[in-house]
Amino acid sequence: MIDYDGCFSSAARTMQASAIRKMGGLGGRVPDLISFAPGFPAPELFAWEEFRDVAQSVLSGSDPSVLQYGSTRGYRPLVEALAQILSERGIAATPEEILVTTGSQQALDLTARVFIDPGSVVLVELPTYTGGITAFNNAQATLVGVGQDSDGIDLEDLDRVTVRERAAGRRIAFLYVVPNFQNPTGVLMSLEKRQRLLEWAARRSVLIIEDDPYGALYFDDVAAAADTRPIKADDRDGRVVYLSSFSKTVAPGFRVAWVAAPAAITAKLEVAKQAADLCTGGLDQRIVYEVWKRGVLTARLPKLRSHYQEQRTVMTRALRRELGNLVSWPEPKGGFFLWAAFPERVNTDALLTRALARAVVYVAGSAFYVDGRSSNLARLAFSAPSAARIEEGVRRLAAAVREELDVSTSSVLAAPGAPGRPASP
Amino acid sequence: MIDYDGCFSSAARTMQASAIRKMGGLGGRVPDLISFAPGFPAPELFAWEEFRDVAQSVLSGSDPSVLQYGSTRGYRPLVEALAQILSERGIAATPEEILVTTGSQQALDLTARVFIDPGSVVLVELPTYTGGITAFNNAQATLVGVGQDSDGIDLEDLDRVTVRERAAGRRIAFLYVVPNFQNPTGVLMSLEKRQRLLEWAARRSVLIIEDDPYGALYFDDVAAAADTRPIKADDRDGRVVYLSSFSKTVAPGFRVAWVAAPAAITAKLEVAKQAADLCTGGLDQRIVYEVWKRGVLTARLPKLRSHYQEQRTVMTRALRRELGNLVSWPEPKGGFFLWAAFPERVNTDALLTRALARAVVYVAGSAFYVDGRSSNLARLAFSAPSAARIEEGVRRLAAAVREELDVSTSSVLAAPGAPGRPASP
């Protein structure tokens, strides 16, 4: 018997499976599971008819390059479309500054490889996106957390941590932030804080990786497009690497995302991508491009926004009704997630067993913390289940929480079906 | 101005762009270029009609999971199909041992990350595939070359090199080999040598990465399916990681390939893939699966084999006619490549300038050598251009070679159009 553990690289020995993917794998094993775990877009909103129509046309065979190996940089018309999409977000980027990636996870991975040496510090928000954590961990970064306020990253803590790490002789590779509807907290970084963050980055000479998968999905009742202006839009020094994706607005199955960065960085990411997968799928890129070109994407965005806004309302109302003041959350102004805080006695890692027994699942807060903390927090994705399933899932979750608290008879809790407090917001 | 070079990781600072990709990028810039550079499959053989038909059906919307985030391991019916495909090649692999990858390049990259520590030795054939070289280099491996005979890797040299590297205190991560129609030489490793290689690997405790993109594309006039039996088929110890792909048999634009390895290794590769791109494209996987399930792939293989065999014949005849005994090559028994040796005075790196001036391009031998040697060798891909373009490309190449030799008046060379020596084979 071969000792495979002895064969693995030291990076491989410390690789950890994604907690979200693990939860995602439960679907087939727990009957009738309601999952608030993965940030899946709602598939009933996918433009199936248009996809079929575009696929027919690009697979006609008249352009053989569709299915040939493609350029690593990306399908040129798509790269040019991305320049226009970026421009609509306030970002001036030339095709030389843009790289198409096989999903945003690849962009995180390439970024990790291009900037991180083993032991380099990566500054992340506390909590932060697990996909970033795994990509940076696999490059053997030391992840250092920075606190967040209700309007985004805590700049004083950020400066304190930066000074401390540098004083200890460590190299800071970059700061990773998700300013729009942060994953997992849903927090929207204020415009004023974005400006101050850029000034700070210039003063301290730190690169910023800005991850923006959700910016287009703001909720009209509490936010506007102007609130989502990327940090990159005001990046005059070339200090920001901007990541975005079509996974939440077109469909994740196509695996098409992109990076906009200074040309020297984009060129380096491109070389890294050559070794990673040569090129992003040709059919996927063309479908996404055609969907954009025909105006389908732009026309659908208002519908996506109102749909996810309604999903959020359904979840917040159900939570308030089922758990009253036993749950709270920062108001999500866009995106897919609600960051729920239960009473402090409720540890969400422990709660998972009870939740699964009731066929409901979420991602425990611990997955998003790089400081190893376990807590009373959970990420609830309201994006994919139907309204009825959200209602039912929240009922199950509330029952699990009550059981955990062993206070099911307490008057604090409203009985299922009883009128609850007004929904928030 | 930010000093980006100072921001890059040490791995990024030494990353090198692929020579093949560089040549591939010339297409748009040199008018009427005939390219023998990239190993592109012939797009006129793609099953366009079947692809359109399958796309219509999988994009019906009746199965929303088609365009959702998918399992990292791969679309389950495809994984099971791969078990059957592998079984037809003599490899017994369970679904737990199989991982779908986003092209074989990703499999090389994941393999690199899972086994290579900075400074680990990777043993490769001299010459070897550039995609392997870049993936292993990016993981900061030390690449050490091993000679090849006409029937594959030189086992004595392999053992000598292994003993030498270990005596020097270096860790050997694995041996990388392409036994079927090696890239770039086209060499087919003999069955006897495969057996002896496995015995050697057991004796020396070395893992083998077996890359097999071309196995199904043997040439009936000089080889048979039995000659391509993978090393993995006789791997009773669990010492071989087997890579294969649909890029050459279905189409590269779909980016679907796979790994078969012992379950412990596959599980580790899967975790690495989570951080690399979450999952392979859902539409691509389903198209490939359906094409296989409908029998389209199997039915087309004989046609692909005879087509590429004919392409090889066209190229070998043209080379013999245009260059006589100024060129030689090991007989390709399958695959896409001919490994041409010109007179020793011809350096193929230098020759490129002359070739480009005549609008023909190839990949210089130096790209495939990890020992930095420049040489009189070139990889000529006969897979993609039409027969007429192969003829014309060889005429141009021959003119460039003659010019380089400055012997255009010599009687050694047949004038263009004059009857040449009999073609080989």
Image (tube, coloured by chain):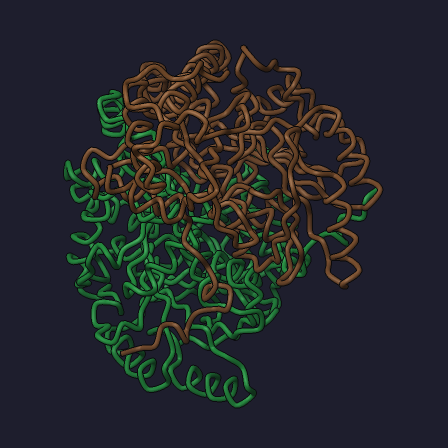
Chain colours: A green, B brown
Q: Quadrant of residue B417?
A: top left
Q: Is residue B60 visible?
A: no
Relative image position of residue A233 (x, y in whole percent): 21, 67
Identify which residue is drawn at 20% across, 35% down.
A290
Relative image position of residue B131 (x, y in whole percent): 49, 44
Identify which residue is drawn at 16% across, 58% down.
A87
- Location of the C terminus of chain A (image quadrant): bottom left
Q: Is residue B322 visible?
A: yes
B419 relative to B208 in the view: left or right: left
Q: Quadrant of residue B239?
A: top right
Q: With respect to residue B106, does B340 lie above or below?
A: above
Relative image position of residue B149 (x, y in whole percent): 66, 34
Q: Quadrant of residue B31?
A: top left
Relative image position of residue A66 (x, y in whole percent): 29, 30
B227 relative to B104 in the view: left or right: right
- Location of the N terminus of chain A (image quadrant): top right
Q: How many marks?
A: 0
> Which of the pair A228/A375 is nearer the observer?
A228
Identify which residue is drawn at 21% across, 36% down.
A291
> Which of the pair B234/B292 is nearer the observer?
B234
> Which of the pair A216/B296 is nearer the observer?
B296
A185 relative to B60 in the view: left or right: right
Identify which residue is drawn at 48% across, 35% down.
B341
Q: With respect to residue A277, does A97 lie above or below?
A: below
Q: With respect to residue A194, does B185 lie above or below?
A: above
